[in-house]
Amino acid sequence: MPNLLNDDIRGQVKDLFDAQLKQPVEVLFFGSSIKENCEYCEETHQLLEEVISISEKLHLNVYDIDQDSSTAQAYHVDKTPTTVIAAKNDGDLSGKDALTDFGIRYAGIPSGHEFSSLIHSIVLASGRDSGLKPETRQLLSKLTKPIHLQVFVTPT
């Protein structure tokens, strides 16, 4: 399959990553080995491979939603393809790397306008800071119960 990212886009992303990636980022891809159950799984996996290859600070883990159901459940993934953006932390006392889940998910292929959102999410996770203003952080600190926020986009 030909590359999804042309040289110009790849160069722009590389320049951005070189300038702004601070800490390692783990990208988790959840697909399905049953092609009928996962439209765009192959393309999404390829897109993520191409993005990850741009910087050594990025890592990709690939999971099958059925074969790796406990991992899918741990990350609240219930559809394919789904991409999870997490922070890869240095090893803890046991020597294992731990991940910090920021709750960033992409269901479906993050192409078109969603591609720039994917790249921005990776940069944010790398900086370990949302960039929210102090007033917004203060308002959010007053929340007393979890909020489930979803943004839906259609490729039209």
Image: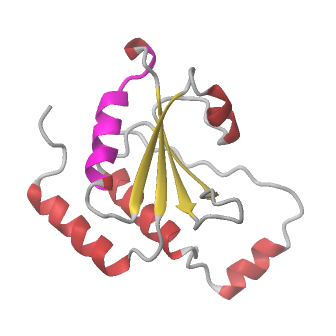
Q: Residue furthest right?
A: 144
Can see residue 9? yes
Q: Quadrant of the C terminus?
A: top left
Left or right? Give the position of 91 relative to 17.
right
Quarter assignment of residue 154: top left
Q: Quadrant of the N terminus?
A: top left
Q: Residue at x 57, y 73 (%)?
A: 128
Residue 100 at x, y percent in the picture: 63, 60
Residue 33 as seen in the image, left or right of residue 79: left
Q: Could you tell me which residue is drawn at 12 percent across and 37 percent down? A: 2
Would you say 106 lies left or right of 36 here? right
Place of residue 94 in the rendered image (x, y in percent of width and height, measured from the top left): 70, 59
- How far across and down, in percent of the image, does residue 110 sit? 37, 46
Q: Main secondary structure of the magenta part?
A: helix
Residue at image position (58%, 76%) is 129
Q: Does the magenta-highlighted stretch encompass residue 26?
A: no
Residue 39 or residue 63, whichever sits in front: 63
Which color scheme did the rendering employ for the protein?
A: secondary structure
Q: Which residues are magenta?
A: 37-51
Q: Is residue 120 above or below residue 70?
A: below
Query: Residue 41, position in %: x, y?
Result: 37, 29
